[in-house]
Image (tube, grey):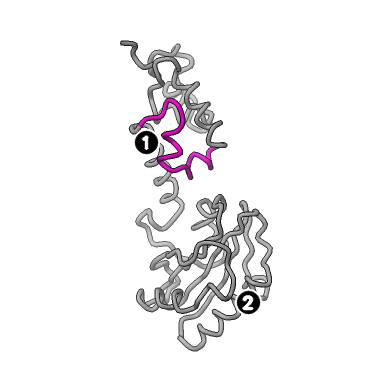
């Protein structure tokens, strides 16, 4: 039975782990960094070739970090163990950029919101409305996904949004949603939804601080635009 080709089977000058220790992680390619995590290739393919093919099949790092287990297992050379390693890496990456890391996350401006949600929401293929709930000092209490799909004012009901905020004793909320087109320019429906929620916030006593629209690496704050 043929053994799997491991990193140690590569010439020493090509081994990603040795190169990382010698030159630093920042000097390694995406393929090399992934190879250090996955460690072994297949019987017919070394780990560097396998990782290069995985990155190509997934369409880059964003594709890898947002792939499901089913999608990963369809790639030749990935079994349950490698799929689990990649999924764990993806989740750690998301947690590192969010308050889920265990640290308190305070929001003081729209850029803080973008840091919290951008990497996850910029690659979504459907519109998603997310509510960020804050305490009196603007620390994040909870983040909740409320609606999925094309958003309009007849579907987005304030009841679901403010029910979550009340349950979590929120002092204020920020709503966020993505535009799969990559362009964060607000539509007339985005503005209608914002105005409707703002009126409800006055009655309920939970302030709507902002509505952030996420594009591909860019965002628009309706508060900054003077719409809210």
134 with respect to 152 (left or right): left
Instruction: Write down the residue under mark 2.
Output: 192
As measured in the structure, the alpha-carbon distance from the residue carrying label 2 to the one carrying label 1 is: 43 Å
**Quick one: label 2 or label 1, which is nearer the N terminus?**
1
Residue 181 screen position, x and y as percent: 65, 54
Magenta stretch: give its range: 60-79
Which SS class for mark 1? Answer: helix
Using a 10 Å C-alpha cutoff, classify the residue at mark 1 as few (fewer than 14 neighbours), some (14 to 19) or many (20 or more).
few
Identify the residue shown where x is 52% and y is 77%: 208
**Magenta run includes residue 61:** yes
Identify the residue shown where x is 37% and y is 30%: 79
Residue 87 screen position, x and y as percent: 39, 41
Quadrant holding the N terminus: top left
103 with respect to 31 (left or right): left
Front label number (2 vs 1): 2
Above or below, 168 relative to 24:
below
Instruction: Write down the residue under mark 1.
Output: 85
Identify the residue shown where x is 50% and y is 52%: 120
**Magenta run includes residue 30:** no
**Picture quadrant of residue 219:** bottom right
């Amino acid at each position: 039975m043929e053994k799997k080709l491991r990193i140690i089977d590569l010439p020493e000058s090509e081994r990603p782990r040795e190169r990382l220790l010698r030159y630093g992680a920042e000097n390694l390619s995406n393929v090399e960094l992934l190879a250090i995590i996955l460690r072994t290739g297949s019987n017919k393919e070394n780990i560097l070739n396998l990782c290069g093919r995985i990155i190509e099949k997934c369409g880059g790092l964003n594709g890898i970090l947002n792939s499901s287990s089913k999608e990963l297992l369809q790639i030749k050379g990935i079994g349950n163990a490698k799929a689990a390693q990649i999924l764990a890496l993806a989740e750690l990456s998301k947690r590192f950029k969010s308050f889920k890391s265990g640290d308190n996350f305070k929001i003081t401006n729209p850029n803080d919101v973008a840091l919290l949600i951008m990497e996850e929401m910029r690659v979504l293929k459907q519109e998603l409305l997310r509510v960020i709930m804050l305490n009196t000092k603007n620390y994040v209490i909870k983040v909740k996904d409320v609606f999925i799909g094309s958003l309009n004012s007849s579907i987005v009901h304030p009841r679901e949004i403010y029910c979550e905020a009340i349950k979590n004793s929120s002092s204020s909320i920020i709503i966020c949603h993505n535009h799969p087109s990559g362009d964060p320019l607000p539509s007339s429906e985005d503005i209608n939804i914002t105005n409707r929620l703002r009126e409800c916030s006055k009655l309920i006593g939970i302030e709507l601080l902002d509505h952030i629209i996420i594009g591909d690496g860019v965002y628009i704050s309706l508060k900054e635009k003077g719409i809210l």
